[in-house]
Amino acid sequence: MEYVSICMLLDYRKQIDSNLSKTNPLEYREVYLIWYDQLCVDNFPASVKEEKPLLLFIESVQRVNQIPYHKKKLVFLYSAMRHFALECEKMGFSVYYHSTSDDYASSIIDLLQKHTHWNLSYMQPSEWDSREAIKTVKENYPSIQEYPNNFFLAPLKPYVPRISKGWRMEFFYREMRRMTGYLMHGENPIGGEWNYDKENRKKLPLEINLPPVYKKDKDNITHEVMDMVEAIYPNNFGVIKDFNYGVTRSDALDALQYFLGNALENFGPYEDAMTIRGSVLFHSHLSMYLNVGLLNPKEVCDSVIHHFEKNQTIPISSIEGFIRQIIGWREYIRIYYEAMMPKVREANYFNFEKSLPAVYWTAETKMKCMSECVHPVIEKGYVHHIPRLMILSNFSNLTGTDPRALNEWFWLGFIDAYEWVVLPNVLGMSTFADGGILASKPYVAGGNYVNKMSDYCNQCSYSVKEKTGNKACPMNYLYWNFIDQQRETFSKSGRASFMVKTFDKKSILEKNAIKASSEKFLAELPRLSKEEWLSNA
Ligand SMILES: Cc1cc2nc3c(=O)[nH]c(=O)nc-3n(C[C@H](O)[C@H](O)[C@H](O)COP(=O)(O)OP(=O)(O)OC[C@H]3O[C@@H](n4cnc5c(N)ncnc54)[C@H](O)[C@@H]3O)c2cc1C
Ligand code: SF4
């Protein structure tokens, strides 16, 4: 990747420079560093809110030189940071907005060397690499003060030891329901069940229309950031055109209201459905805002519960399903990250070593399910949970792809991906790379599942009804091939051991055809590592 000079960066900060008052950093002693994913004044430590130190923003592009993040993700992040800096100034803070092509550690050290009178404080970052960066700084400047991270709901201490030993989400979730009081009658869950997952699996009927996706117009700041990203990173992943995500707290609150009014009611029943008609369906599309602090999880849950109390027509499966995602999965995933890092970065239980299939970079394939799920990632950096799990990760598993390469692809390709959330979902949940700490069995499925949950197969060049041969759906034979090859793992898993038994009952002829079709498909499958893709870009 090309080196980005500071002059190039300075060319693209005219908007922020003309809107932000000039601050003289020499005039301040107390300085509070804002990380890129902590964009919320309400979360500032009480002393920061009261004493109003100088707020230091560091817009570092150094990591982008290593990971070719989606262009829309970069626009979202830089534009959101710039808007937040201006908002802080309006709230009476002085702001020092620093652009750099250096990494965080060197740029903070550099600033501290120039401003030896600064007393720096910050909130613990959510991502490991940022923590490592600040650790390096602290070795030279031990007086820097760290505040605990307050962007999550669950305390770490009681849960880290349990989750690292394989304690499942469902039990954690019940404790979170008790702790928060959401959907509880005293000690009991409202409606009598803790979990309405069984009611969250309907296929989308033709007569149900999808709400339009929430969109926001761009202002000059976002236009300038788009110009910067396009000029500096023309070959990064994804399409920059038609950026229409919100970038401020008020946009994020609007997006939350939009979800409550337009989608929440149908969220539960169609949570697992997929369709060629759209990639968001009735999902909230709020993860990008939650993960940078523009929304906080408590206010999202409070709004959902309040809306439910006012609108009794909303089914419990929608409300419970949504609350479970936030106080259950999201919090559990974050604790898993704390418990498992950094060793888990190298997890690869099945020892798969193959590069990603080329379709992950190009969306070019005859498989309708894959093209339908990769296209929105390239266009928008988003598909909902089930395409991530049951199509994109499933195909990676079935093709023996290195889960770490898949993890990196998710990390660079998705608008909401930060390591604390993407890594547990990929290496823990979707690829079983951790060997079963997070999930009880590998998530794999054949064409039947895809056909049951989507309208993709009707439009596909392959036939979902055919099990082997050139016309057959590749998910079909690859699935059974996977079960056969990983039989030891499935046989050990109580719930999944029946799959091996089902395979074993197949005739020799059928087993041979599964093997032959799989070998042919895998041998002909074009693959492209990140490095190869970049060198072609
Ligand atoms: C392979 C894979 C990779 C994923 N990578 C990411 C990622 O990089 N960033 C990310 O935020 N989520 C990730 N998820 C979780 C989930 O798919 C997304 O949070 C969700 O699709 C975001 O869309 P939404 O806001 O419309 O979510 P909704 O379906 O509306 O759910 C509401 C909220 O619940 C939270 N949530 C739900 N499931 C999870 C989960 N498993 N982990 C964490 N939070 C969850 C999110 O904050 C989400 O906004 C991944 C899941 C899988 C299977
Ligand atoms: S037939 Fe198979 S390959 Fe085609 S869309 Fe369905 S599951 Fe995907």
Image: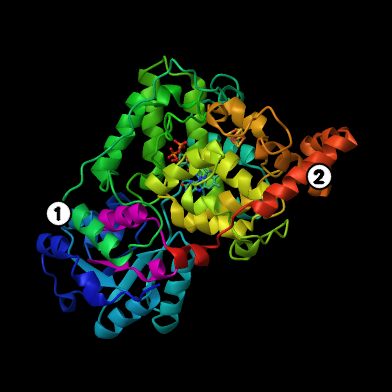
Query: Between 421 and 27, which is closer to the camera in this rendering?
Result: 421
Image point 79% across, 45% down: which residue? 515
Quarter of the rendered image showing ligand 2 = top right
How packed is label 2: few (under 14 Cα within 10 Å), some, or many (20 or more)? some
Q: Where is residue 464 in the image (x, y as percent from the top left)?
A: 65, 30
Q: Evaluate whether residue 393 shows in this view.
A: yes
| Residue 181 to residue 19: above or below | above
x and y percentages locating residue 487 in the rendered image: 82, 46
Estimate the spatial distance between the alpha carbons at disc 1 and disc 2, rounded to whole Å.
62 Å
Query: Disc 1 or 2, which lies upstream in sequence?
Result: 1
Element under disc 2 = helix
- Mark number for residue 382? none
Q: What element carries label 1?
A: helix
Q: Is 223 left, or right, of 324 in this rendering?
A: left
**Disc nearest the viewer among 1 and 2:** 2
User: Residue 32: percent from the left, percent from the top?
Assistant: 29, 67
Task: Look at mark 2 in the image and give the residue it sits on.
Answer: 484
In this rendered view, identify the residue nearer to me: 5 or 491. Answer: 5
Residue in front for this viewpoint, 78 or 138: 78
As for residue 285 lying within the magenta part, the answer is no
Work out whether residue 432 can be spotted: no
**Res 263 → quadrant:** top left
Q: Residue furthest front?
A: 470
What stretch of residues is rendered in magenta?
Answer: 54-81
Residue kind at label 2, given as amino acid type: Asp
- Write down the residue under mark 1: 90
